């Protein structure tokens, strides 16, 4: 998702399935760090049951009446990133019927034509290894860009992106059926990216998750494993993925990845989050 974090006050080799790479948020078909990555046939995507057992250590079930400030920070205003066109404000994130609802609206604020919400757990909930998941129902429409992702916590202590590392657990754009899972880091002084997409039914609820230990990050939609990144022994400079990360939820409108065409008939658009959960391996 976004390769930059706004001040809170203003608010071995890499073994992966065939993937898509990105400069900033724009996906492309080349790896811009020249990391040699073996290609695994797409038919190796499979439904599995992970034999690792996990213990729930934190969750937000969104059973209250508003966003819990003990769990979440709001990033507000324009982040001036990715050529996005939304103005973030806390008012666009509500809690109702057991769901967090992030709403993108066709309204002009701060010189931007749309409003939405972006929230994170920085300095509240930081995660290193485990299982991170959310059950989410996504909006469908041109120009919409919902995401569930993580940034390295040290981005708030002077480490720039992409050196801080980024794990995009789920990204979706427009009215497509495709879900994207991607990792971003710095290798040899250059941005390195790896990920894969998976066909799904984003307008229905699905569980989007990663399992993460000191050897690998694995991406799932429900029980379907569709990409694995080997981070064992800091292979290919993946040391960022052995440090704490925080969680981000947001719904962007327009930008480099979805494009600038926005289907106004789909606004207001809602991203529904049933829960966010963090587990540790037993």
Image (cartoon, rainbow, N blue to C red):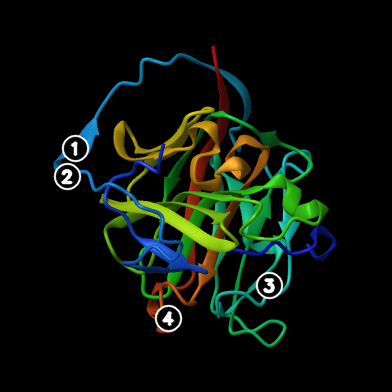
Q: Quadrant of residue 87?
A: bottom right
Mark 3 vs 1: CB contact within 8 A: no
* Residue at image location 46% in from the left, 73% down from the top: 267
Residue 106 position, x and y percent, is 54, 79
Q: CA distance from mark 2 to mark 3?
A: 38 Å
Residue 248 position, x and y percent, is 61, 50
Instruction: Tell me the element at label 4.
Output: helix
Q: CA distance from mark 4 to mark 1?
A: 39 Å
Instruction: Tell me the element at label 2.
Output: loop
Q: Mark 1 — residue?
A: 44
Residue 19 position, x and y percent, is 31, 54
What is the crowding at mark 3: few (fewer than 14 residues within 10 Å), some, or many (at least 20)?
many
Q: Nearer the viewer, residue 237 or 122?
A: 237
Q: Mark 2 — residue?
A: 41
Q: Where does the C terminus fall, quadrant-wise?
A: top right
* Residue at image location 49% in from the left, 40% down from the top: 235
Q: CA distance from mark 3 to mark 1?
A: 39 Å
**Mark identifier at residue 79:** 3
Horizontal side of residue 72 vs 162, given as left or right: right
Is residue 136 visible in the rendered structure shown here? yes
């Amino acid at each position: 998702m976004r390769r930059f974090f706004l001040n809170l006050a203003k608010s071995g080799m890499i073994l992966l399935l065939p993937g898509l790479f990105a400069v900033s948020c724009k996906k492309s078909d080349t790896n811009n760090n020249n990391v040699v990555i073996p290609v695994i046939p797409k038919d190796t995507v499979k439904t599995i049951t992970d034999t690792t057992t996990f213990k729930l250590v934190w969750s937000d079930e969104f059973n209250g009446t508003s966003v819990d400030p003990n769990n979440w920070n709001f990033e507000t205003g324009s982040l001036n990133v990715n050529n996005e066109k939304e103005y973030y404000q806390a008012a666009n994130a509500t809690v109702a019927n057991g769901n967090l609802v992030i709403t993108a609206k066709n309204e002009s604020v701060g010189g931007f034509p749309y409003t939405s919400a972006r929230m994170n757990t920085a300095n509240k909930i930081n995660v290193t290894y485990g299982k991170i998941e959310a059950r989410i129902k996504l909006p469908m429409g041109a120009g919409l860009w919902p995401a569930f992702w993580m940034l390295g916590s040290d981005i708030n202590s002077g480490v720039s992106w992409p050196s801080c590392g980024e794990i995009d657990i789920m990204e979706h754009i427009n009215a497509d059926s495709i879900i994207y899972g991607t990792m971003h880091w710095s290798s040899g002084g250059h941005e390195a990216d790896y990920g894969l997409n998976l066909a799904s039914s984003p307008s229905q609820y699905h569980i989007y998750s990663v399992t993460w230990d000191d050897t690998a990050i694995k991406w799932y939609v429900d029980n379907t494993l569709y990409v694995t990144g080997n981070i064992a022994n800091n292979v290919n400079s993946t040391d960022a993925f052995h440090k704490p990360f925080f969680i981000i939820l947001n719904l962007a409108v327009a930008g480099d990845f979805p494009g600038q065409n926005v289907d106004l008939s789909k606004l207001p658009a809602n991203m529904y989050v049933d829960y966010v959960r963090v587990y540790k391996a037993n």
